[in-house]
Amino acid sequence: MTRKLLDTLYKSALYAAAIFIVVLLAMVVAGVVGRLVGFHLRGSDAYAGYSMAAAAFLALAHTLKKGEHIRVTLLLQRFSERTTFAFEVGCYVVGLFFCGALAFYSVRLSWQSLVFNDISHSMDETPLWIPQIGMAVGTFIFFIAVVDELYLHLRYRKRDAAVDVDEVKGVS
């Protein structure tokens, strides 16, 4: 049940990232068309940037779970399985620390922007906590995914923990 909940969380974040990519495309197209017809869509550049940042951070967890993050395996192939396992656990622990810090400070940044009523310096004057939510949520979900990967790595002792749990258990 927990596995289904986590997988649903990762997929939901991925779908939200896809929506932000579509919004990014819409903002760019609206800006280009607006320039061609002599109309300026106020804040389209800023909203395109906000959408790109939200899409990038929201897609991090699903990308990690599918094993698509860049991994340097050239060095690991030269070590024994035990050394490789220990090295990977160390990397997950270090990653956990940095992801936790990133998630904490992203959430804190959004909260402070809300409390201090911080607004964008561009013409749109958007309250900054709104676009910062995408980054905060994305980094928090990414932190959960790193914890999940570390757990799977320790539990199943797989060289590449970014695999489907059903595959590890032998269930099709």
Image: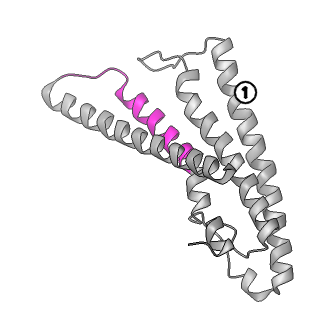
Residue 61 against residue 128 in the figure, above or below: below
**Quadrant of the rendered image containing residue 43:** top left
Residue 149 against residue 138 in the figure, above or below: below
Q: Which residues are magenta?
A: 39-59
Residue closest to the far left? 37
- As for residue 43 lying within the magenta part, the answer is yes
Q: Tell me which amino acid carries mark 1.
A: Arg
Lateral position of residue 148 relative to residue 34, left or right: right
Q: If the image is split into quadrants, where does the C terminus sit?
A: bottom right
Report the label total: 1
Towards the viewer: 151 or 63: 151
Residue 111 against residue 88 in the figure, above or below: above
Residue hosting label 1: 108
Which residue is found at the position 33% from the left and 20% from the top? 42
The overriding secondary structure of the stretch rendered in magenta is helix
Which residue is found at the position 32% from the left and 41% from the top? 25
Q: Position of residue 166 (x, y in %)?
A: 62, 67
Q: Position of residue 155 (x, y in %)?
A: 81, 66
Secondary structure found at label 1: helix
Give the crowd class for mark 1: few <14, some 14-19, many >=20 residues within 10 Å.
Answer: few
**Quadrant of the rendered image containing residue 100:** top right
User: Taking the image as drawn, is residue 163 in sight?
Assistant: no
Residue 31 against residue 84 in the figure, above or below: above
User: Taking the image as drawn, is residue 57 in sight?
Assistant: yes
The type of colouring in the image is: one colour
Q: Position of residue 1 (x, y in %)?
A: 66, 50
Which residue is found at the position 78% from the left and 41% from the top? 101
Lateral position of residue 128 relative to residue 122, left or right: right
Lateral position of residue 43 relative to residue 100, left or right: left
Lateral position of residue 112 relative to residue 4, left or right: right
Which residue is found at the position 65% from the left and 25% from the top? 110
Q: Position of residue 148 (x, y in %)?
A: 72, 55
